[in-house]
Image (spheres, grey):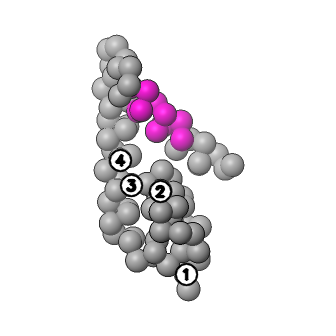
Amino acid sequence: MKAAHIITLILWAFGIVNLLEPFNGISFYIASVIFYLLLIAHVAECVIYRQKILKSNDSAFVAFSMTLLFGVIYLGSIKDS
């Protein structure tokens, strides 16, 4: 797994843990901002790059899930046909 994938997963985990068991103090706000920015950005990427995602070799479910999780990191791995 590449470093970019690991960093993205750590950021998602940080935000999700904060949702399940909120942190105290400024950590709560930092984790919330990170989580919601990732969520909004990756949902927007799913909408904007819908056609590219559907053209990938992966199934639509896997492709959209990977885009939601990794965003442009995954989109860069899709070969243009």
* Residue 80: mark: 1
Residue type (three-letter) at the residue carrying disc 4: Leu
- Mark 1: give few (<14), some (14-19) or many (20+) Cα within 10 Å: few
* Residue 65: mark: 2
Q: Disc 1 on helix, strand or loop?
A: loop
Residue type (three-letter) at the residue carrying disc 1: Asp
60 vs 44, nearest the viewer:
60
Q: Quadrant of the C terminus?
A: bottom right
Q: Position of residue 58 (x, y in %)?
A: 57, 69
Residue type (three-letter) at the residue carrying disc 3: His
What residue is drawn where x is 46% and y is 75%? Answer: 54
Q: Disc 2 on helix, strand or loop?
A: helix
What residue is drawn where x is 37% and y is 37%? Answer: 34
Does the residue at mark 4 contact the one at mark 1 (Cβ under 8 Å)? no
Q: Which one is earlier in the sequence, the residue at label 3 or at label 1? A: 3
Residue type (three-letter) at the residue carrying disc 2: Ser
* Residue 39: mark: 4
Residue under pointer 3: 42
Q: Is residue 46 left or right of residue 66?
A: left
Does the residue at mark 4 contact the one at mark 2 (Cβ under 8 Å)? no
Q: Main secondary structure of the magenta part?
A: helix
